[in-house]
Amino acid sequence: MPTQGRKRKTDDEYIENALLHICFVVKDAELARQQALAYGAKDLSHGVVDMDISNQSKTVKARNSLVYSPNGEVIEFLEKVDFN
């Protein structure tokens, strides 16, 4: 699953200061995904993804969803995670 926007094609106009990926913390990742799709985003995750984020001492559960904005940026909707 990609984590960045698509690479600029040779014939694409250059866009200065464009974002590739932005993440919003939301209450409901699926609802946020559905709302973004209704406003013209393209589906990237095909639903909510449940994942475990681990380091050497702790594992936390996380839920997110991903869409491409109409401009091609990856927008991530992440449900609040307690990393403490």
Image: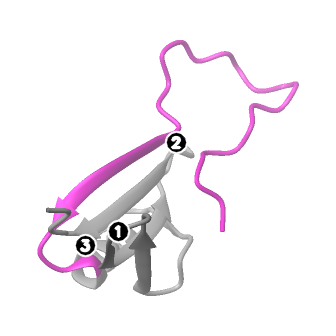
Q: Which mark is residue 32?
A: 3
Question: Which percent across, then down, holds residue 29?
Answer: 27, 77
Q: Main secondary structure of the magenta part?
A: loop
Which image quadrant is residue 80 in? bottom left
> Relative to residue 14, is residue 49 depicted above or below?
below
Question: Is residue 48 left or right of 18 when viewed as pictured?
Answer: left
For the residues labelled 1 and 2, the Cα–Cα distance comes to 39 Å
For the residues labelled 3 and 2, the Cα–Cα distance comes to 18 Å
In-front residue for pair 25/58: 58
Q: Is residue 51 magenta?
A: no
For the residues labelled 3 and 1, the Cα–Cα distance comes to 31 Å
Query: Can you name the residue that lies furthest to the front here?
Result: 57
How would you rate the neighbour count of disc 2 (Cα within 10 Å): few for under 14, some for 14-19, many for 20 or more? few
Q: Which residues are magenta?
A: 1-29
Q: Check disc 1 and report the residue beneath it.
A: 57
Quadrant (top left/top right/bottom left/bottom right) for the C terminus: bottom left
Question: Which percent across, then down, holds residue 72?
Answer: 57, 46
Residue in the picture at 19% in, 60% down: 25
Q: Which mark is residue 71?
A: 2
